[in-house]
Image: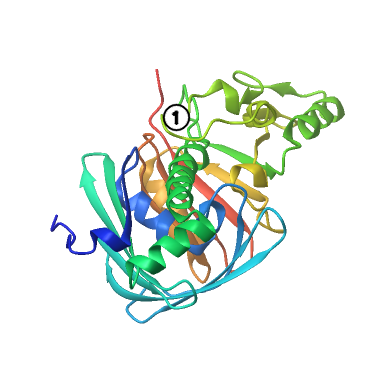
Amino acid sequence: MTPLENNTADREIVISRLLNAPVELVWEVWTNPNHIKNWWGPDGFTNTITKMEVAPEGEWDLVMHGPDGTDYKNKSLFKEVIKHRKLVYEHVSGPKFTATILFERQGHQTHLHWQMVFPTREELIQVVKTFNAAEGLKQNVAKLDAYLQVKFTLQQELKTTKKARVSTYLNFPGTTEAAFTFYKEVFNGTLLGKGFERFGDVPGPEDMPPLSEEDKKLILHVELEIMGGHVLVATDAPESLGFKLTHGDTMHIHLEPESRAETQRLFEALSKGGTITMPLEDMFFGAYYGSLTDQHGINWMLTYSEPKL
């Protein structure tokens, strides 16, 4: 990888990080507004993206919602886009800067190098004083790492057979345990696997900000068999962990076909005329996975994993 120019050292903020995800996945999470809205910004921020055209001269219009209720409007223009390798954008609303993000494949991992260059040293100092920009960038990258781990490892299932399965995947803003306790009683159902698996049960990235005691109690993954062999699967996706649930995005039909070929066939058929939210690809957690919204507005997730015998 060509190193970035170093004559900007007195007016730049730089961070590098090795992410435990393949470059295709990191690129998708960075360039797809359906994903980046969930992890962008410092701790406590949520986002509304009205436009994100990841192409040279493409516009990116974003409103960041601060934890105190303040809205921060952001407008950027993409200047250079090299798929799976490099993004350059100019932040044209104040404060002005140019950001360069380099993606380097390292086996099944990705080395991310993120540089923000300001017009002058004085402007950098002012931004650091006003917005604590260096710490904000560090938190932003930590949230990206956490999103990659939490959002996608939720899809990994402990499969012991090749038998196909259809389940309904639900997201809750922190009320999964209450909801599934209710459903379990209504259907006299059975919790599968380990029952309620909590965020505090799974170690996060080394330099991820520590979870609060409340967030540690939230549900990372749970499965409940209700009737006719149907399974409900769910996770908590609260704003405290960088998520922002939108009405209509909280439920997916989750398909686990018997073969890779059938997974691809179903994905191609369902996505015709719809919107692909995650391309069907081999993921770092060992599954062939993709997600989409079909032409009728229904959300689908498809996963094929080799059974663990």
Q: Outermost residue toward the right?
A: 186
Label 1 sits on residue:
162
Determine if residue 253 is in view: yes
Q: Quadrant of residue 298?
A: bottom right
- What residue sits 69% from the left and 22% below the top? 191
Q: Is residue 99 left or right of residue 249?
A: left
Q: Quadrant of residue 286?
A: top left
- What residue sits 31% from the left and 63% below the top? 11
Q: Is residue 86 above or below residue 90?
A: above
Q: In this view of the protein, which residue sits in the foreground, 272 or 12?
A: 12
Pinpoint residue 130: horizontal percent, then vertical percent: 53, 60
Q: Outermost residue toward the bottom?
A: 57
Q: Is residue 309 above or below residue 239?
A: above
Q: In this view of the protein, which residue sits in the foreground, 246 or 257?
A: 246
**Quick one: label 1, few (<14), some, or many (20+) residues within 10 Å?**
some
Determine if residue 296 is in view: no
Q: In this view of the protein, which residue sits in the foreground, 13 or 207?
A: 13
Which quadrant, please, contains the N terminus? Answer: bottom left
Q: Amino acid at mark 1?
A: Lys
